[in-house]
Amino acid sequence: MGILEVKNVNKNFGGLKALSEVNLSVRENTVHAIIGPNGAGKSTLLNCLVGKLIPDTGSVMFDGQSVLGRSPYEINQMGISRVFQTPEIFGDLTVMENMLIPIFARRDGAFRMHAFESVANEREIIEQAEHVLEDMNMADKRGMHAASMSRGDKRRLEIGMCLSQEPRLLLLDEPTAGMARADTNNTIDLLKQIKQDRDITIAIIEHDMHVVFSLADRITVLAQGTPLVEDDPQNIKGNPKVREAYLGESA
Amino acid sequence: MLGLDKKDATLLIVVAVLTLCAPFILNPFPTDSAMAQFNAGYPDLMQRFIIFGIFAIGYNILFGLTGYLSFGHAAFLGVGSYSAVWIFKLFSYNVLPAIGLSVVVAAIFSLFIGFVSLRRSGIYFSILTLAFAQMSFALAYSVLSNPKFNLTNGETGLQVYADDPQWFHRDSLPDLPHLFGLSMRSTYTLDVGAWSFDFNAGYYLCAVIMMVVFYLAIRIFRSPFGMMLRAVKSNQQRMNYTGLNTRPYTLAAFVISGMYAGLAGGLMAAMDPLAGAERMQWTASGEVVLMTILGGTGTLIGPILGAGFIKYFENIFSKINDTVLHEWFALLPDGIEDFMVFIVHPFIGKGWHLTLGLLFMLVVIFLPGGLVEGGQRLSRLLKRRGTKAKPEDSEHRPEEKPHVAE
């Protein structure tokens, strides 16, 4: 029984079958990659997991509880954090403030009217934020305007923000899309480090095979909205079905 | 001090000193001099500076922090005024219960309007608030002033009549708004040589209240709650996926700013026991938007500066007329004098809106951070003069972001 169980999920957009009979089981403390060609339904599936979309039929269970019908913030409070394809950070705020917000969210829940306390007095939270910033190698950037950082740093910050919440499941949506090779390698190293240091389950959607094969413990291949195979990386590489659907002639 | 860091405490003290000494600062010219018309130190205008300052401080908590542009805040101001005058009519001229009720009623009103309007964001939110404010205006102007149920007294405006009950009124008390017997209109005039300075009870009541609410605004800006509001402005998507529900945060900001508006409305009625529907009109809502942007959106002191600036223009520039202009240009030959008066004429008197509009455009284009940014640039320029610019590679060393209130 995995921490995330997707059962018989279907999702149609008008006449288009985006997902049909998707089953997926993500085991605890593993890195599970979801790959597939463009239009395979990877992003649709991810959106069904975080509350942005509701599947037409089927169930999505996280840690024994259904996430269907809950809004994104409730699902986050259950312990799922999401990293976006283009980094979603608080661009107008400083790096430090970006880090504080998720930690406040974890401590105080979805809403708290703490209007007469001072941020500067929240020693414990500031310490935690500083700790995560150090883990992310960003301690020197704490006073910087988040929007003025490089793409790689923004990605790093976003991952840090998600980790600071100590989620049980981290969802990564093409974390290296549009990145230079060096930034990609840095991100891989960072994710490897995270995997090593923490008890965390990671589900990753990725195009880049280099990233997938350097991180994943388990891979699901999606094609045209249906899972083709779910297997270990070494078996996926040699699987003729996968070659045909995904890697195509170039493989 | 009071839970503020050093910089905020300094700011608070500076504002306190300025407001308390305003009767001196705003009356720099001798009473009989030609420049006396630029004196703004008379009670009526000083009260307005403060009241609109409060209005703008509150508006800035919504607009400056969350970025939600409301075009309907005048409705809360009007509601505040009406409730205060009703207290005067029914109970007594004591201003404290009147101001208290105006804040409470405005809070209830803004809770309702905010709850509905905040279902949308961006331009749709603005339109919804505008619609609500215009509905309130129409209600106050005509619907709620029929003979059977006269809540607002329509066009005439709500005021206190001799046959109103005023249950707690005693004959020993002034027949005007007062604070435990101290009339809001009582003024002590200090004559020093050619100068004269007015110290008005109503003004000082407003000033003290403004300092309290300004202090509260600083606390909100520095609180985790204030940080969340800025996060709402920055990225709602990230908010939602960080486990935060944006709806109650924005609603709380909306209600707080509505309460500030109600307080301003109540104070207005306390200074002059009248409430008219025009206070709720969309132009009044637009004015507070202008004040906030002109002064500096999202800064602490900006809205107060903006409010003072606009009210000064409204009251002082509008008083300059052609006769005054002829006096100014009297030294020039007649033809040129007439020509100059002809040129300047559209910008003064009733044309002050034109001047204000031009200034507003200049500020928005060249100083997007408002007057506060202007001040910052000026002080940076002076500092650079003082220390000689360091040859520094500014492009590759991004500046640290200044804190919100700088």
Image (spheres, coloured by chain):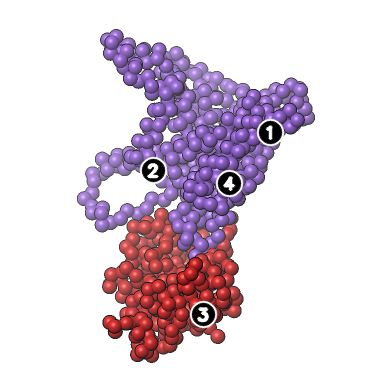
| Closer mark to the observer between disc 1 and disc 4 | 1
Q: Which mark is residue A21?
A: 3
* Quadrant housing the C terminus of chain A: bottom left
Mark 4 is surrounded, within 10 Å at the Cα level, by few (under 14), some (14 to 19) or many (20 or more) other residues, namely many
Q: Quadrant of residue B362?
A: top left
Q: Nearer the viewer, residue A71 or B8?
A: A71
Query: Could you tell me which chain the residue with mark 1 belongs to?
Result: B
Is disc 2 placed on a helix, strand or loop?
Answer: loop
Contact, CB < 8 Å: mark 2 with mark 3?
no
Residue behind mark 2: B369
Mark 2 is surrounded, within 10 Å at the Cα level, by few (under 14), some (14 to 19) or many (20 or more) other residues, namely many
Q: Residue at x 35, y 54 (%)?
A: B400
Determine whether B186 is above or below B248 in the image: above
Hue used for the chain lettered A: red
Determine whether A70 is above or below B320 in the image: below
Which amino acid type corresponds to the residue marked 1 in the rendered image?
Leu
| Closer mark to the observer between disc 3 and disc 4 | 3
Same chain, labels 1 and 4 = yes
Q: CA distance from mark 3 to mark 4?
A: 49 Å
Residue behind mark 4: B256
Q: Position of residue B165 (x, y in %)?
A: 77, 27
First along the sequence among labels 2 and 4: 4
Which amino acid type corresponds to the residue marked 2 in the rendered image?
Gly
Is disc 4 placed on a helix, strand or loop?
Answer: helix
Q: CA distance from mark 2 to mark 4?
A: 23 Å
Query: Could you tell me which chain the residue with mark 3 belongs to?
Result: A
| Closer mark to the observer between disc 2 and disc 1 | 1
Q: Residue at x 46, y 48 (%)?
A: B6
Which amino acid type corresponds to the residue marked 4 in the rendered image?
Ile
Is disc 3 placed on a helix, strand or loop?
Answer: strand
Q: CA distance from mark 2 to mark 1?
A: 41 Å
